[in-house]
Image (tube, rainbow, N blue to C red):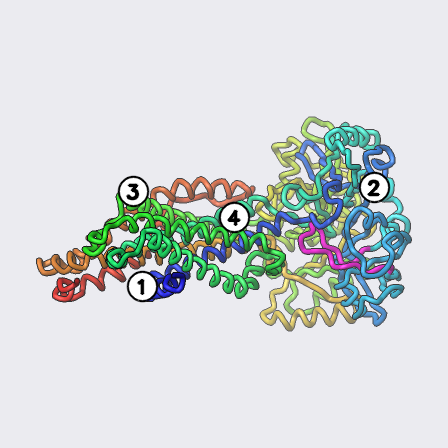
Amino acid sequence: MYKNYFKNAYRYLGKHPLATAINLFGLASGICVCFFALLYVRFELSYDRHHAQADRIYRLVTDVNTASGITYESTSAPMAPSIQANFPEVEAFTRIMPDYLMVQKEDRSYFKEENIAYADPSLFRVFTLPLISGDSATALEAPFQMVLSETAALHYFGTTDCLGKILLLDESPAVVSAVMRDMPYNAHYRIDILVSLSTLLDEWNPSMKSQWKRFGFYSYLLLHQDKQVEALEVKISAHLQEHIAQQESEYKLSLEPLTDLYLHAKARGSRYGSSVSGDISNIYIFSVVAVFVLFIACFNFINLTTVLSLQRAKEIGVRKSLGATRAQLIGQFLFDALHLSFLALGMATVLCVLLIPAFQQLSGKIIRLHFPEHALEFLWLIAGTLLVGLLSGIYPALFLSRLSPFQGLIGSVKAGRNHGLLRKSLIISQFAISIILISATGIVYQQLHYMQNHALGFDKNHKLVMDFYFDSKVVEHQESVKQQLAEIPGIQQISFSSAVPAKANRKYTTEIENANQQKQEMMSDAYFVDDDFLKQYGIALVAGRAFSADIASDSTEAMLINEAALRSLGYHDPEEVIGKPFVQQGRSGEIIGVVKDFHYHSFREEVRPLTLRVSAGGNPYTYLTLDITSSDLRATIKQVEEVWSASVSEKPFGYFFLDEAFQAQYLAEERFGKLFTCFALLAVLLSCLGLLGLSAFSIKGRVKEIGIRKVLGASVGNILLLLSKDFIKLILIAFFVAIPVANYLLTEWLHAYAYRMALSWWFFVVPGSLVLLLALLTISLQTIKAARQNPVDSLKYE
């Protein structure tokens, strides 16, 4: 019997190659998309769950509420040790401080190492970080000890057997005390070199031990099993008030569950790096869109399978005349549908294997395709495939198996009214989804274009930026460095600064007299710049004056603020703040000017209060910006490198272009746009393929009618309109359904951006018109062919 089922199934599929191809390709594509969605969602939800004690680890964070708003900070060095000493609920703590150090090997080669951090020896007590060699209890105990990841060990020494070997960290020798496995990709921070925190706090900067307001440390608490987090949060915030005055600003400590950090916590970073963070809304969007595509694929499959089954009435009549039972007929129909759906699953599996590299690039995630590891996802797909097969086969199995031999042999079988209504509803739904996805794609790219091309308040073009990492030799000879580089043809302007737009900057607590003549404390972003920075970057003044090299006090007692800071202080006229006193980092002086707001971070964020100063003591400068107007960019950069290496610095020459760095902030939007483009194109393709199959069967059933109409004088245009109008009506309904839904969803998505484009009617009309045009073209392929057929051949049909 089963052999007969197979023979009939392949005969049935072979007689209808178009429908079979559409079904296999459509369902395989939908399953493939759904599988990738499951992989992505599982990966995003798995962050930090590999730690054995993940459910007991909490990150300690600080919210600073000032008159200018709330700033979200990490912690300072003394906070975690003080909390553990005073609260028995805390079993252990550890601190991590990301940094950016120059690493030097024995052969004197330099490397700028960004995946580096200081850490307490208790790091291995709190987190699960397996070691390849070394003792976790003592690996970070003494100053100038370091733990390398497997990748770092191979990079610097070519082997993981490197205990006791030396690397220079900012010219200070440090010894390898352990080698650890690479941190997994689904961790909210990934570090390749861990340096003992005592190196920083005991040797390089002991004052940080007692500075409660100097943030930059990620502190993690391991709580006992019987933890009461809410009660502990209240107690530690009260404890903080004993060490930080709350008059001007309110400081509050909170505990964030480790497993919530990636998707639900706010990013709390610093100049030297930060933990990565995701977006739970992206998971929702990715999942919903994948379900939409699967919906279109599945219902195309069900529609076409059902319509195709209705063509088998004569076969049923013959088989019933020969003694086939209803159970055998039901078994054949279900077998055919399930067989086709599992063929699609096989194709989808092959597609997943072939497309996983493209998916990794599109999603920006390193997700390994390992079927034993992803057995649960594969079982879900098998269950879904089984369900689709049963749904597509159950209606014709139950309906057609009831036919009498006479009904089957005369072939007068039509789907019921409810089935026609269902099919129309599904066509409307899938085309509405297609229109929504195309609209979303257009708006994502329009918002990206808006952010990349909107006025920024500064000039980002032709700027080559070098990060010399606070090299004292460069800073101490600023004018000499500028003079040497200015002699290179094609270089016009040069400036030094502690930060540049699109890169992280420092934040400081700043006191300035507000409009009510009271000292107001605010947490402000801070730039330290030289006298040429404002002019080079084209940052406009709205009041006061810029820094001047001719006024000696500007280097110690002058400050500029932006308009956002002006508003937070309560001033309406920028001239009113000129001459007002300030205190920042123990330095005092007066405001000499107000600069126009400029977007020094992405358009996702509102412009925050910013202060600009010439220096803050010590060595604040790390960036050197060159305006390059040369037509031969490569030759100019080569000359800059030669001058740099020969007479400026021994540190490696590295640079980036400011416009590229600014554009890199929108990598997530670019990936989002590519993702929607792929989904939208696939959704439209599947919808049109489904429409192609349905129109082909519709026309096939009206061949005689077409022949009679042609004999009576109907033109090709008349027949095209007759056969297309029902489908066009459904697509028009889909258009009017999609517009309000798309408008609502995309308006909500745009609210995530502080600065966003305005929606216009054509963002929805154009996609709808495009889908209508494609649908009409799809139907026309079959209709025109039927309309141009010789009426004699049509009337001889059957």
Query: Does the magenta run of residues contain 38?
Result: no
Mark 2 vs 1, N-terminal side? 1
The local secondary structure at tag 2 comes to: strand
* 4 or 1: tag closer to the N-terminus: 1
Which label lies toward us, 4 or 1?
1
Residue positioned 76% across, 47% down in the render: 551
Quarter containing the C terminus: bottom left
Could you tell me if residue 781 is visible in this image? yes
Judged left or right of residue 105, residue 290 is left
Residue located beneath label 1 in the image: 16
Compared across the picture, whether 216 is left or right of 698 comes to right
Q: Residues within 10 Å of mark 1 (few under 14, many from 20)?
A: few
How many residues crowd mark 4 within 10 Å: few (<14), some (14–19), many (20+)? some
Q: Viewer-proximal residue, 89 or 681?
A: 89
Tell me how far mark 1 sits from mark 3, CA to CA. Answer: 25 Å
Q: Which residues are magenta?
A: 177-194
Residue at 57 percent across and 61 percent down: it is: 361
Q: Quadrant of residue 17?
A: bottom left
Q: Are marks 4 and 3 in contact (CB under 8 Å)?
A: no
Farthest-out residue, left? 712
- Disc 3 target residue: 418
Q: Are marks 3 and 2 in contact (CB under 8 Å)?
A: no
Given this view, does label 4 or label 3 mark the residue nearer the observer? 3
Residue on which the image places disc 4:
287
Nearest to N terminus: mark 3 or mark 2:
2
Callout 1, which amino acid?
His
Q: SS of the residue at dot 4?
A: helix
- Using the image, tell me which numbered label, if any, was put on residue 92: 2
Give the crowd class for mark 2: few <14, some 14-19, many >=20 residues within 10 Å: many
Report helix, strand or loop for mark 3: helix
Give the residue displayed 51% in from the left and 43% down from the top. 749
